[in-house]
Image (spheres, helix red, strand yellow):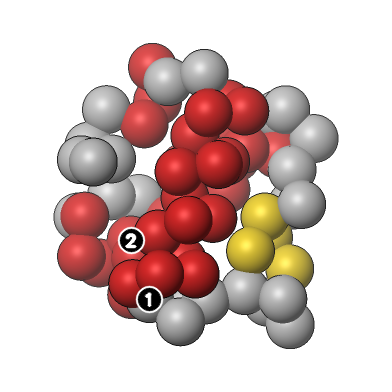
């Protein structure tokens, strides 16, 4: 799954995909995920925050 078009994705689906990628491929490291997909981490966090999801570093996922 390519996250390059994350800004146009449904936020609930996006959160699910991002959390799966964080868990399976990036050990909860949001910086690594953003670098790998060459996306703006702040924009991703803002998109998910607009739907009520915040990144919890201690959990390594959005909730």
Q: Which residue is mark 2?
A: 34
Horizontally, is 7 left or right of 42 in the view?
A: left
Q: Is residue 6 above or below residue 35?
A: above
Whether label 1 touches label 2, CB < 8 Å = no
Q: Position of residue 37 (x, y in %)?
A: 21, 55
Q: SS at mark 1?
A: loop
Q: Which residue is mark 1?
A: 26
Does residue 46 appear left or right of residue 25 in this picture?
right
The residue lying at 28 percent from left, 49 percent from top is 39
Q: Quadrant of the N terminus?
A: top left
Pointer 1 or 2: first along the chain = 1
Where does the image place residue 42, in percent across and percent down from the top left? 49, 52
For disc 2, the neighbor class at 10 Å (few under 14, some 14 to 19, many from 20) is some
Query: Residue 32, image x and y in percent?
Result: 33, 75
Q: Please tell me whether mark 2 sits on a helix, a strand or a loop.
A: helix
- Image-based side of 10 in relation to 9, left or right: right
Q: CA distance from mark 1 to mark 2?
A: 10 Å
């Amino acid at each position: 799954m390519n996250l390059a078009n994350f800004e146009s994705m449904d936020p609930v689906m996006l959160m699910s995909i991002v959390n799966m990628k964080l868990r399976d491929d990036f050990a909860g490291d949001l910086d690594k995920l953003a670098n790998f997909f060459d996306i703006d981490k702040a924009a991703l966090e803002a998109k998910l925050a607009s739907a009520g999801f915040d990144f919890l570093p201690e959990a390594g996922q959005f909730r």
